[in-house]
Image (cartoon, helix red, strand yellow):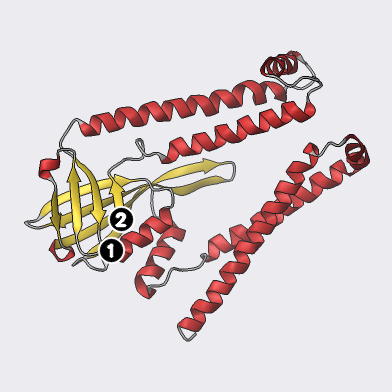
């Protein structure tokens, strides 16, 4: 298992998030232009003509948001995160720091920016491995919540030498599970939350995996969230479909399917969430049978 020493600011995670949003926005805008614009010839110049006409229209103020504000946010955010990561990695490479750690089946390899300082040791030589989960407070219209920002690993090796590195993985829970798997071979392992407080759901999963050795199913809180997500997405899709029902015959005659994409997406997400809940229940039943409960 290879772990790079990258902080939250230099992690590729946020770059990928902005790429995802920018890509979805670009694809959605192109689809809207192809299926909703009145231009017979679809071309780059025609796209800009359609965009300018939409902005000059006083009937739909949301066009300004869709065609100006959102791309500015997505593409500017992408550029900023790329530049920020480049500068952070450049600063890290200019000093003697731990570059990465390789957790191998029988040994641990510590890699520095200057290769001459690299060294390898066995798991028995690691006196302590501490996992620090740094959290921050997130906000939405429903209130505040705890978000995991980055994971720090502190190693105490050989003659009480202390080494540490940070990472912001894409798959947080799987990353933590792997760390716990490797930590079973060291002399002492511990973890703690630092910053904004304890992430309750994550703590429940970690404790469950540490004590039982089996990857846990959804926590009770997550299961409730998934149930509400399924209901909300289904109702949104159903209501949108009912609202478009009067236009159904017209759209079929004109060969327009674009207006029905969003209802189908919402209902599809609802069924996917239901499928996750069903799989979760099957895993839970198997887990109880495995432990004789």
* SS for dot 1: helix
Label 2 Cα neighbours within 10 Å, binned few <14 / some 14-19 / many ≥20: few
Quadrant holding the N terminus: bottom left
Q: Nearer the viewer, mark 1 or mark 2?
A: 2
* SS for dot 2: loop
Q: State left or right for residue 138 relative to residue 5.
A: right
Position of residue 251 relative to residue 266, above or below, is: above
> x, y (%) of residue 42?
74, 22
Label 1 Cα neighbours within 10 Å, binned few <14 / some 14-19 / many ≥20: some
Q: Residue at x 77, y 22 (%)?
A: 60
> x, y (%) of residue 14?
44, 38
> x, y (%) of residue 89?
29, 33
Q: Which mark is residue 1?
A: 2
Q: Residue at x 45, y 83 (%)?
A: 291
Of all residues shown, which one is farthest toward the left? Answer: 159
The residue carrying mark 1 is 182
Q: Which mark is residue 29?
A: none
> x, y (%) of residue 173?
42, 57
Position of residue 73 relative to residue 197, above or below, is: above
Nearer-the-camera pick, 143 or 52: 52
Q: State left or right for residue 252 relative to residue 16.
A: right
Count of picture labels: 2
Q: State left or right for residue 286 relative to residue 255.
A: left
Verify CB contact (< 8 Å) between mark 1 and mark 2.
Answer: yes
Q: Residue at x 46, y 60 (%)?
A: 201
Q: State left or right for residue 68 relative to residue 138.
A: right
Mark positioned earlier in the residue sequence (1 or 2): 2
Q: Residue at x 40, y 61 (%)?
A: 203
User: Disc 1 versus disc 2: distance between alpha carbons?
Assistant: 9 Å
């Amino acid at each position: 298992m290879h772990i790079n020493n990258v902080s939250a600011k230099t992690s590729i995670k946020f770059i990928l998030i902005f790429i995802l949003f920018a890509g979805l926005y670009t694809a959605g805008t192109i689809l809207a232009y192809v299926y909703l614009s009145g231009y017979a010839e679809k071309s780059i110049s025609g796209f800009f003509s359609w965009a300018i006409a939409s902005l000059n229209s006083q009937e739909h103020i949301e066009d300004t948001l869709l065609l100006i504000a959102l791309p500015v946010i997505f593409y500017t955010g992408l550029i900023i995160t790329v530049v920020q990561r480049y500068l952070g990695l450049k600063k890290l490479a200019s000093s003697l720091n731990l570059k990465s750690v390789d957790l191998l089946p029988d040994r641990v390899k510590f890699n520095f920016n200057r290769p001459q300082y690299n060294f390898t040791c066995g798991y028995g030589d690691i006196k302590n491995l501490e996992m620090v989960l740094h959290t921050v407070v997130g906000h939405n219209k429903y209130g505040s919540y705890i978000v995991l920002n980055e994971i720090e690993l502190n190693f105490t090796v050989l003659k009480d030498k202390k080494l540490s590195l940070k990472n912001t993985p894409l798959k947080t829970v799987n990353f933590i599970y792997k760390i716990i798997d490797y930590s079973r071979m060291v002399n002492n392992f511990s973890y703690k939350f630092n910053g904004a407080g304890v992430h309750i759901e994550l703590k429940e999963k970690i404790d469950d995996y540490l004590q039982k050795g089996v990857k846990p199913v959804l926590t009770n809180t997550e299961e409730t969230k998934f149930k509400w997500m399924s209901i909300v997405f289904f109702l949104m899709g159903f209501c949108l479909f009912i609202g478009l029902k009067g236009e159904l015959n017209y759209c079929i005659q004109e060969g327009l399917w674009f207006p029905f994409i969003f209802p189908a997406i919402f209902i599809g997400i609802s069924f996917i969430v239901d499928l996750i809940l069903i799989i979760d229940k099957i895993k839970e039943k198997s887990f109880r049978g495995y432990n004789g409960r």
